[in-house]
């Protein structure tokens, strides 16, 4: 029997990608306390924190073939933070809607709107971390609706340079969203983000 406790995060991640349940169990053993602390620090609710960590690990196992993990610790910490955010957004939405006695159709519609808003905020966060030219080109194109030729003139690069930076920006965004399970939501809301 292998001693998974001696494996590096990178080795465990590679084994997880192959569906190795023992590697998954070791990841859980290694990180659940740290993730619980992160969840509690953000939620100040012990039961919610446990549910959040539970959801993160279930999601990890369900999506192990789809996610690209470069840094396991950072990936899990980020997953917890976004799960905390979504958890409290859902709780707040439920409370608000219960007080206002909305019909079911309205609840579904509000959930879609909230997902679109959260997705936009998440994309904005990804864009903020991009290299400067990439960020500028994306902002001018998507937020201000400028044409490639206008962007090229504005920041003094070629139109090909604009296209390359846009392609790079979209690749970064798609990669980050895929890593965090947003691909289905993108399909629903992409027209709202990139009109």
Image (tube, rainbow, N blue to C red):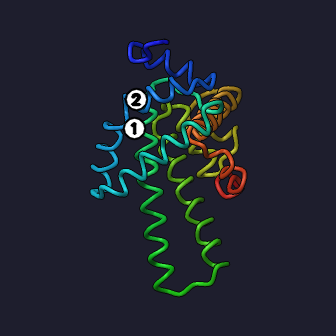
Rendered image quadrant of residue 5: top left
Question: Eyeballing the image, is 106 above or below 181?
Answer: below
How many neighbours does mark 1 have within 10 angstroms: few (below 14), some (14-19), or many (20 or more)? some
Say which mark, if any, is on residue 73: 2
Number of dots carrying numbers: 2
Rendered image quadrant of residue 35: top left
In the image, 78 versus 193, the foreground residue is 78
Disc 2 versus disc 1: distance between alpha carbons?
6 Å
- Evaluate whether residue 153 shows in this view: no
Q: Secondary structure at mark 1?
A: helix
Tell me where residue 51 appears, x and y as whole percent.
Answer: 42, 53
How many neighbours does mark 2 have within 10 angstroms: few (below 14), some (14-19), or many (20 or more)? some
Tell me where residue 126 appears, x and y as whole percent.
Answer: 51, 40
Q: Is 81 situated left or right of 181 in this image?
A: left
User: Among all residues in the image, which is located at the extreme front?
Assistant: 1
Residue at image mark 1: 77
Question: Eyeballing the image, is 31 above or below 194?
Answer: above
Q: Secondary structure at mark 2?
A: helix
- Evaluate whether residue 182 shows in this view: yes
Tell me where residue 134 appears, x and y as whole percent.
Answer: 56, 32
- Name which residue lies at 44% across and 67% down: 91
User: Among all residues in the image, which is located at the extreme bottom?
Assistant: 101
- Name which residue lies at 63% across and 65% down: 112
């Amino acid at each position: 029997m292998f001693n998974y406790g001696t494996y590096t995060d990178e080795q465990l991640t590679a084994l997880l990608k192959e569906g190795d349940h023992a590697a998954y169990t070791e990841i859980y053993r290694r990180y659940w306390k740290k993730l619980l602390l992160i969840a509690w620090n953000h939620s100040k609710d012990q039961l919610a924190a446990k549910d959040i960590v539970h959801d993160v690990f279930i999601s990890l196992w369900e999506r192990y073939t789809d996610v690209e993990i470069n840094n396991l610790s950072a990936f899990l910490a980020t997953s917890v933070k976004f799960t905390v955010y979504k958890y409290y957004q859902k709780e707040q939405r439920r409370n608000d809607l219960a007080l206002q006695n909305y019909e079911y159709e309205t609840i579904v519609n509000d959930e879609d709107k909230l997902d679109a808003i959260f997705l936009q905020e998440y994309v904005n966060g990804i864009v903020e971390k991009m290299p400067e030219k990439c960020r500028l080109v994306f902002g001018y194109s998507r937020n201000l609706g400028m044409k490639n030729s206008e962007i090229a003139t504005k920041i003094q690069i070629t139109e090909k340079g604009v296209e390359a930076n846009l392609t790079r920006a979209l690749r970064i965004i798609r990669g980050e969203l895929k890593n965090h399970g947003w691909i289905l939501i993108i399909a629903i809301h992409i027209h709202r983000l990139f009109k």
